[in-house]
Image: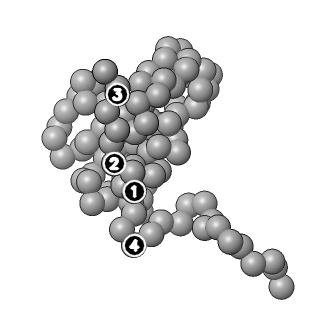
């Protein structure tokens, strides 16, 4: 018998959380995620591939160059590069519970 876990296992989603498309990736390392906030194309970026810094829309903090993170954009709007957003991985996974924070002025 294994010990009891007091925290959810990675990869599991709540009934209101995002679901991953069982069909597979969109292209290359992209995949689609569907949640109450719509359908998203999502790509994980490794630290080696991240060559510049970005501002995370989830926490309004900087994602330094070289930090692994997530790039996501809405599928249903047909938007291109201008609709891509770079998120901290944890912020992306918790976006439905926190909402988007706006930077201080």
Real-space CA distance between mark 3 and mark 4, rounded to the nearest whole angstrom: 30 Å
Mark found first going from the N terminus, 4 or 2: 4
Instruction: Kindly state the secondary structure of the residue where label 4 is placed.
Output: loop
For label 1, the residue is 97
Real-space CA distance between mark 1 and mark 4, rounded to the nearest whole angstrom: 12 Å
In the displayed structure, would residue 26 be above or below residue 2?
Answer: above
Residues tagged 4 and 2 counted as in contact (Cβ below 8 A): no
The residue at the far bottom in this view is 1
Residues tagged 1 and 4 counted as in contact (Cβ below 8 A): no
Query: Which of pointers 4 and 2 indicates the residue nearer the eye?
Result: 2
Mark found first going from the N terminus, 3 or 4: 4
For label 2, the residue is 99
Mark found first going from the N terminus, 3 or 1: 1
Instruction: Kindly state the secondary structure of the residue where label 3 is placed.
Output: loop
Q: Position of residue 69 (x, y in %)?
A: 52, 34
Instruction: Kindly state the secondary structure of the residue where label 1 is placed.
Output: helix
Q: Position of residue 26 (x, y in %)?
A: 37, 45
For label 4, the residue is 15
Crowdedness near tag 2: few (<14), some (14–19) or many (≥20) residues, C-alpha within 10 Å? few
Query: Which of pointers 3 and 1 indicates the residue nearer the eye?
Result: 3
Q: Quadrant of residue 102?
A: top left
């Amino acid at each position: 018998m294994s010990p009891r876990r007091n925290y959810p296992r990675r990869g599991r989603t709540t009934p209101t959380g995002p679901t991953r498309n069982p069909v597979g990736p969109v292209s290359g390392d992209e995949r689609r995620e569907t949640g109450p906030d719509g359908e998203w194309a999502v790509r994980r970026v490794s630290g080696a591939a991240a060559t510049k810094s970005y501002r995370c829309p989830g926490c309004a903090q900087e994602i330094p160059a070289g930090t692994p993170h997530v790039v996501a954009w809405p599928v249903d709007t047909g938007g291109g590069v201008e609709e891509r957003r770079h998120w901290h991985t944890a912020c992306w996974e918790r976006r439905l519970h926190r909402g988007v924070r706006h930077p201080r002025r």
